[in-house]
Amino acid sequence: MIAALLLLAPITPVPDEPKPIPTTISAIRKDPKKFDGQVVRLHGWVNQCAPRGCLIEDRSAASPGGAGASLSIVGNAKFDATIKPLLPTYVEFDARFDASCRIQASGSAITICADRAPELTVLTLRGVVSPEPPPFEKP
């Protein structure tokens, strides 16, 4: 009986995630169409992350000249909970990039996306470095 059920079950391999493309925030902003739908590996600063806005930026907001170029991170409760106690923090992650808020469709206007625009859907948080030591390590 079990063997018969196994024969009826479709056997489909689980597709592997594509290998991430290491890139920069500025490179994506310069040519969003090139990265549309791709899995990218980014590193940068998450200076703040709230329900209405979460960005990865080139630099710390406290840097001379400000945070620099940015991309929006899609809302994700697990990502937000991990990042929130460490803000501001330097991160590295793999994410799928969606250029719909950055490119113009032929003959139409650019889509304007507000709040947490669907640009980066984080797939793997690879590293987080807080600029402050944890409370138990502070002098």
Image (tube, rainbow, N blue to C red):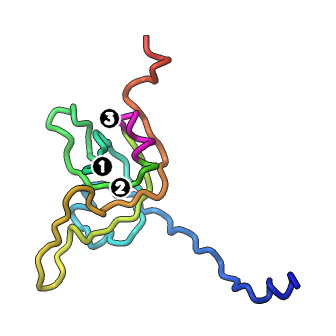
Residue, x 42% and y 57% (percent of image)?
A: 122
In the visual, does 27 lie left or right of 38? left
Q: Where does the image place residue 10, in percent across and percent down from the top left?
A: 69, 85
Q: Report the magenta stretch's main SS.
A: helix
What amino acid does circle 2 point to?
Gly
Q: Are marks 2 and 1 in contact (CB under 8 Å)?
A: yes
Write down the quadrant of residue 113 in the picture. bottom left
2 or 3: mark nearer the eye: 2
Image quarter hosting the C terminus? top left
What amino acid does circle 3 point to?
Pro
Classify 88 as above or below 40.
above
Q: What is the distance, in whole Å, between disc 2 and disc 3 at their CAs?
A: 17 Å
1 or 3: mark nearer the eye: 1
Q: Inspect this view and state whether residue 55 appears.
A: no
User: What residue is pinned by disc 3?
Assistant: 88
**Mark on residue 51?**
1
Q: Where does the image place residue 77, in percent across and percent down from the top left?
A: 42, 50
Q: Where does the image place residue 101, in percent across and percent down from the top left?
A: 22, 68
**Mark on residue 75?**
2
Q: Where does the image place residue 72, in percent across and percent down from the top left?
A: 28, 55
What amino acid does circle 1 point to?
Pro
Residue, x 21% and y 31% (percent of image)?
A: 62
Segment colored magenta: 80-89
